[in-house]
Image (cartoon, helix red, strand yellow):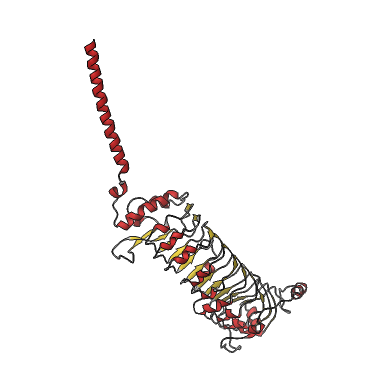
Amino acid sequence: MVLFNQASFSKLKTCIILLCILLVDCQILESASQSLPLVPNILTFIDQRLALVFPIIQNFKKTITSDPLGVTTTWVGPNICNYTGFYCDNPPDNLTATTIASIDFNGFQLSAPSLDGFIDRLPDLALFHANTNSFSGTISPKIAGLKYLYELDLSNNLLSGVFPISILNIPTLSFLDIRYNFFTGTVPPQIFMQALDALFLNNNNFMLTLPNNLGNTLAAYLTLANNKFTGPIPSSIGKASSTLREVLLLNNHLTGCLPYEIGFLKNTILFDSGNNLLTGPLPYSFGCLEKVEQLNLARNMLYGEVPELVCALGNLVNLSLSFNYFTRVGPLCKKLIKNGVIDVRQNCIFGLPDQRSVKECRAFFLIPRSCSHPALFKVVPCKIPPLWKPHVKTQSHRHLLSYSALSRNRVL
């Protein structure tokens, strides 16, 4: 009986030892499997640059809270160049390499709490377009490290905070579109020193005065509409005469008189400062806007005569002066009013239909109003054609990019 117990004990001891050996081996195998970098060994990328951005994209994918179109289902595997929204090209520093050069998320309706840690970590990114999504948060200062980025479109999202100052440190940026977000505060003067071709800041909550150096902009398209800007239109705007083609200042809280220097904008085809609190007469210098087709000054507090020089502009398609307090128009202007080129409804022009009441006009003019340097309002800083020259243009089929920017979902 004793011998049997000893033999049994010996066998039991042997089993325990074998089991411990097996358990140790299993733990070693498990530990090894956890420490192995599975992605690089299993996935094969056509370029090391794509291998480096793969985990960045996958981490961003995990933050996406809504993907109604199923876009992210294609973000699987090593063929990043085939991911929906991602586009590859050769980077400028190595024309034999392959990298993520541009991202187009326009209309994807993706939701994520932030873009931080995503676009700012894609070192070769040249274009990022993300109109009509629900990206929130602020813009990371690290975005300034993107040395090739030249187009940034974050329009129609839920981004907030002050103007993303870090954007000013992107040396290659030529197109900036941050319209339809919730940015607030002031617009930094430095933005008008950047080599931008287009600047779309409309439909945010920017406020306070427009920077005095606004006229230093090199942009052809400048859209500041539908914000809360106050104060006057900077007189420096005339400095942008060689580049500025379209400018939208409508639907703000701008005050003061129209600067005489607007007349220097010889290449501008669209100028819109409607629905503000601007006052004073219409400067004769506006007769020098030789290329202007659309001129909107409606819904302000402008008064005095409508200069015949302005009505003589040969490319004018639409001049909206409605809901002001103008008191007189000449024969050339009357002809264009009749033809529908000029809109002077709800002014104080005697003898024309659909004007303000006498009581309303009298109340307006009982309040003293004046502008500084009144003599400038009748200065004409250009050579103008004879006023008898017939008006040439009655319609335009030109696509005005700045007006397109007023549409929330419109991709520019």
Asked whether the viewer can see residue 76, the reply is: yes
Q: Is residue 393 above or below residue 205?
A: below
Which residue is rendered at x = 52% and y = 71% of the image? 222
Pick the front one: 212 or 281:
212
> Quarter-wise, where is residue 214 in the image?
bottom right
Which residue is rendered at x = 34% and y = 63% of the image? 89
Left or right, residue 90 beside residue 361: left
What is the total number of numbered labels drawn onto the structure image? 0
Left or right, residue 365 beside residue 227: right
> Quarter-wise, where is residue 362 in the image?
bottom right
Pick the front one: 178 or 330:
178
Whole-percent x and y of residue 397?
51, 74
Pick the front one: 344 or 292:
292
Asked whether the viewer can see residue 412, the reply is: no
Furthest-right residue in this view: 359
Which residue is rendered at x = 23% and y = 11% of the image? 2
Whole-percent x and y of residue 291?
53, 80
Whole-percent x and y of residue 398?
51, 74
Considering the image in quadrants, where does the N terminus appear?
Answer: top left
Whole-percent x and y of residue 299?
66, 71
